[in-house]
Amino acid sequence: MNQQHTIHLSSWARLVGLALLLGVGVLASLGLTSRTAHAQPAATSTVSTCDDATLRSAIKKASSGDTIKFACSGTITLTATLTISKNLTLDGSGQQVTLSGGDSVQVLSVDSGVTFILKALTVAHGSSSNVGGLLNSSGTVNITNSTFANNSAPKGSAISNFGGPVVIGNSIVANNTFDSCENISGNGRIIDQSYNLSSDSSCGFANGSLQNTDPKLDSNGLRNNGGPTQTIALLASSPAIDYIPVGNVTNNFNCPATDQRGNRRPDPTFRPDGTLVSESACDIGAYESNYDDDLRLTNIPATITVKATSPQGATVTYTLPTVVDEESPLPPVSCTPASGSTFPVGTTTVTCTVSESEDTNSPVSASFQVVVQPVITISGTSVSATEGRIFSNVVVATGTAYVAGTLSASIAWGDGQTASGAVTLASDGSYSVTGSNAYDEEGSFPISVTVSASGGGNATASGSPASVADAVLTMSTPTVVIDKLAVTLTAAFFDADPDGTATDYTASINWGDGSISAGTIGSNSASFTATGSHTYAKHKTYTVTVTIKDAGGSSVTRTLTMKV
């Protein structure tokens, strides 16, 4: 009985075990099938154009866990904060990429539960009332070989951490306003992964890092340091130079292969025979200096803007870029066009080049621009004219023009009429503007003249008067009809203004006997007439004077002697 019971239990146990094994197998199979059907491998996408829209599009299209790299170099000035809402890596290795807030917007914001990795990038000029550089809202952030500089906010201007870890290694956090780092919540902490440098102590660096240390960044901030775009360079005396020991040969964890510009890490040193000597340490941050060796140009002039001083442009002098190299004496730098040259109106690119046979990157070139702005001066001239009479080729303005292209002029005559003016330009840059017009009425009219250059630039002279006189009146010798002591007088007169009407005129007749009367104005197809009648007291010879006046100011007078 005991034996049968034992066998029965044993068989039951085997059945249960078999069932469990089958269940586990089914579950495992289901799990494998589920993973096979739904898992998506992390992908790497590339930003080819370094601008705000392209980067935002790449972030939007990326799946969780993807990496975004850059096939371009440049300063990406953001129009709004970049919000990281999925697991993502931004890797600027091999390029020069700066994420800039333009001193007007926060640069980065990491959402809760998100893992974000930032590699070999510069975060600069972020600014807002809360955070300047990066805000971590309970996510996980890992920062390596990057630089946070020149960001501004009341607190936590570079990195503000709320409830999640921010791991930083091999990076510079410096020259930000107030405290560079801030832990808003006790659950969040900033973790020093070694070899960081901070200009204050707000980040809490300790593990082989430098605190309260001036990184001696170039005070000019973002500028041309010889690469394809702007970076924040380390000065030769920076404590960040050669501070990080080279890591494992296989993965070179401490010192990635290149810096943000794509320059080799550590910076190479060459013997005179060209043999490469490996260094044992690289620089902290996104920028690898090469003061000990590589030929390069620094202190590239910023864009020079001057005004033209002659028709040929302007003579411009500038300070040559500084040559940096291990050789002594230093090789000369040559710039074209040379300092002291006459630069034409417009924008000219100056290219500076230095060569050294022992440097593998020779020749090295850098460029900057010289902008010569056009200059146009103008003075209006007064004009005298008579109503109803056309005047031609009258000078209305003069001036000086140092410009590119041709000159044109427009004239507003002040009477509602506009016209193009003719510009005569002399070889010394002086010019005059002439025009033609006819004023319908007498008076003073303000003339406005605008001169424009096809290559850019214009000037306007306003208010110069056109003094327009009333048209001239003429009068024929009056005729009289005498009937005993009664006299009727008629005088025909003419106005050069074709628009004159009878109401514009008045007539006065001095009869020569102390009597003066107003004449009556009439008109016919050929002229105007003034008529009047008078009865004398006695027969005698009289001198009669007739005066015609125009409302515009002109007048004409005729006299005659008659015997009554």
Image (spheres, helix red, strand yellow):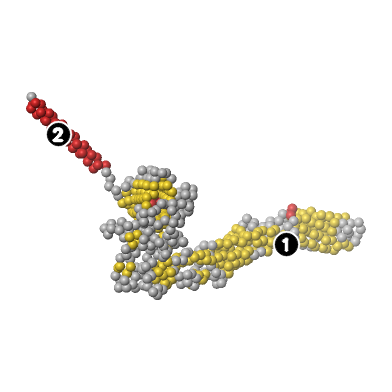
- In this orientation, which residue lies closer to the viewer: 413 or 330? 330
What is the quadrant of the N terminus in the image?
top left
Name the mark nearer the viewer: 1 or 2.
2
Q: Which residue lies furthest to the right in this view?
A: 538
Query: In the image, what residue occupies the spot 36% across and 68% down?
Result: 293
- In this orientation, which residue lies closer to the viewer: 338 or 34? 34
- In this orientation, which residue lies closer to the viewer: 522 or 223? 223
Relative side of 148 to 433, left or right: left
- CA distance separating discs 1 and 2: 131 Å
Query: In the image, what residue occupies the spot 28% across and 45% down?
Result: 40
Position in image of residue 116 (x %, y %): 36, 48
Element at label 2: helix
Q: Residues within 10 Å of mark 2 (few under 14, many from 20)?
A: few
The disc labelled 2 sits on which kind of residue? Leu
Residue tagged by mark 2? Answer: 18
**Corner quadrant of residue 256:** bottom left
What is the quadrant of the C terminus in the image?
bottom right
Relative side of 54 to 153, left or right: left
Element at label 1: loop
